[in-house]
Amino acid sequence: MSEQVQADEATTYDVKAVEEKWRPVWDELQPFRADDDSPREKKYALTMFPYPSGDLHMGHAEVFALHDVVARYWWQRGYEVLNPMGFDSFGLPAENAAIRNDEHPATYTKANIAKSIESCQKYAASFDWSRTFNTSDPEYYRWTQWLFARFYERGLAYRKNSPVNWCPQDQTVLANEQVVQGACERCGAEVTKKELTQWYFKITDYAQELLDGLDELEKTWPDRVVTAQRNWIGRSEGAHVDFVVQGREEPVTVYTTRPDTIFGTTFMVVAVDAALADELVTDAQRPAFEAYREEVRRASEIERLATDRPKTGVDLGVTATNPVTGEQIPVWATDYVLADYGTGAVMGVPGGDQRDWEFATAMGLPIVRTTEPPAGFEGEAYAGEGPAINSPAPGQSTALNINGLDVDSAKRATIAFLEEMKAGTGAVNYRLRDWLLSRQRYWGAPIPVVHCPEHGEVLVPDDQLPVELPDLRRPGHPRRRHDGHLRGLVVVHVPLLLAPRDRPRLRQREGQRLDGVRPLRRRRRARRAAPALRPVLHQGPQRHGPGRLPRAVAGPAQPGLRHQPGQEDEQVPGQRRQPGRAAGGLRRRRRAPDAGLRRPARGRHRLGEHVARRVPEVPAACLAPVR
């Protein structure tokens, strides 16, 4: 072939036409489809799943290309390679994108997934497209719920009340890293602190194991990464010290890494957002305390712990007793102590801690050095090695004297004294915190726990999983606004406890479930079988939209409401019943004249249908009517 011919062919090569010609052939051949029955040795290649909050971008192309090199290498080596593709379709990015585009998350996400698959197939990567799934598929998050159940059974999943970063615009909890200069990184709204009951994974039980594992990783991981991990876990050895506080029966326990500096404790500080601070503050100081607390709630934990942040605080009006010297010291509320660190209280030692030094200087509190700094030291607080001084100070009479001891010896002597006096004990602490996994959002895997008024938390049995997410779309309205409906929706994250009116009739046949995917006639029979289905208990921490619940979502069970078969809801004394509504805010539904089917008013959710999609079969004792 002449050079001229080759040049002419090169100039007429149509990339788009060639791709359009051969892509259907590749789709038909499926050359990278993994065969489970293949005699060849198996390899599993897995890359990250993209968020379907939009189309793919060059970052995805880069990651997929590098991953494809590895997968193709193993194919060429003669292995049978399972290389699936999926989409991380649950979560805040997808829901926020759906709200911005005035779509239901399921509809918006599905459309984006189709678009992303089309884009990804143009990369011609070696994915097995017969093994594609989404994390919002019930058959996928069934295993998410199954794993949660295993954590729960072992005491590694639990709920507790704690202050969290709250975005009032997105109506959700934010991680510290999602708060930028006091604002939500996504919407820019001012972030506040809010007390919420949250689900946690108890990763602190594995703090020491995680730390020990870094010794092995040091051989292959970069030093900076290993150091960052050690600092994140933050193991420290010290003591728990009990301080008797004025007007409180139980002593306040604080953790310190330097119990030898207790002679220099001239004040105590409590996290302003801790329940302890609210308990200790006197009536005279409460107005100033509450105003300060409201101000602090606008700051993130990262901002509060910043070393260059000015130290502020409010005197709580009470004093504590130093267990070694017997002196009375003031108790302050401040922002540089976190509520979830120990008890939320810290003994202030300005001579040995720079933050305490700055606070004492700002508030005019006394400063006593307890460790002798080296000659020529010109700094402020000194936390290094050196002999103990002022422990006790000249003229001070105490049963413990550690003057002249080095730091380690002084720590051991102080801990022994505290344990002998039953005023403290040696302890190990970690900076690592339990993993908060709750988000007050609709678009996420439901937590498989029923909240029973008599038995508390009841885990949904494995054979009843998955607990499916209600659809919440209005019939005939695939597009609708979500303001005040999806934002902050808690009802779907904790399964509703249902009144058991004729509950056996919910099951049409043994082993068959109500999942909302049947033909219309079958769904109608299901709804007819439970015409009076009501959610009678829901525990959610906040309201929805502009100060009210979505119309079709029931709120918490109210005192005085009893749900009995065959009778109307009883009205709470003093409660005004709105026209056309039953007690509790649920609209009365008119019975259809033909089939006895309770139909919702135009534009309203079919609450009975959606709630009944997946009724957890919890023990009968936990399904008793609310009394």
Image (cartoon, grey):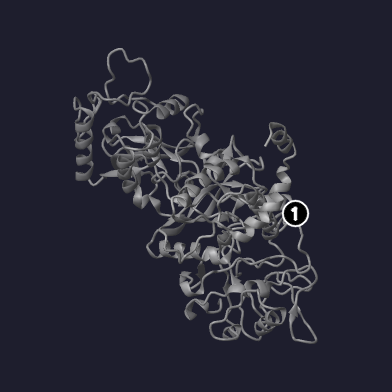
| Residue 527 quadrant | bottom right
| Residue 611 quadrant | bottom right
**Tag 1: amino acid:** Asp
Quadrant in the picture for the C terminus: bottom right
Please, is residue 563 above or below residue 1 in the view? Answer: below
| Residue positioned 66% across, 42% down in the render | 189
Q: Is residue 554 visible?
A: yes
Horizontal relation, residue 518 to residue 619: left or right: right
Query: 142 and 331: which one is in front?
Result: 142
Q: Is residue 250 visible?
A: no
Horizontal relation, residue 39 to residue 500: left or right: left
Query: 560 and 170: which one is in front?
Result: 170
| Residue positioned 46% across, 39% down in the render | 317
Image position, residue 358 (x, y; %): 44, 26
Please, is residue 415 above or below residue 54 in the view? Answer: above
Please, is residue 443 above or below residue 231 in the view? Answer: below
Q: Secondary structure at mark 1?
A: loop
Query: 133 and 146: which one is in front?
Result: 133
**Disc 1: which residue:** 102
Please, is residue 535 above or below residue 104 in the view? Answer: below
| Residue 348 quadrant | top left
How many C-alpha atoms fall within 10 Å of the one at disc 1: few (<14), some, or many (≥20)?
some
Image position, residue 122 (x, y; %): 65, 48
| Residue positioned 46% across, 62% down in the render | 148
Q: In this view, which residue lies farthest toward the front?
A: 1
Image position, residue 182 (x, y; %): 59, 37
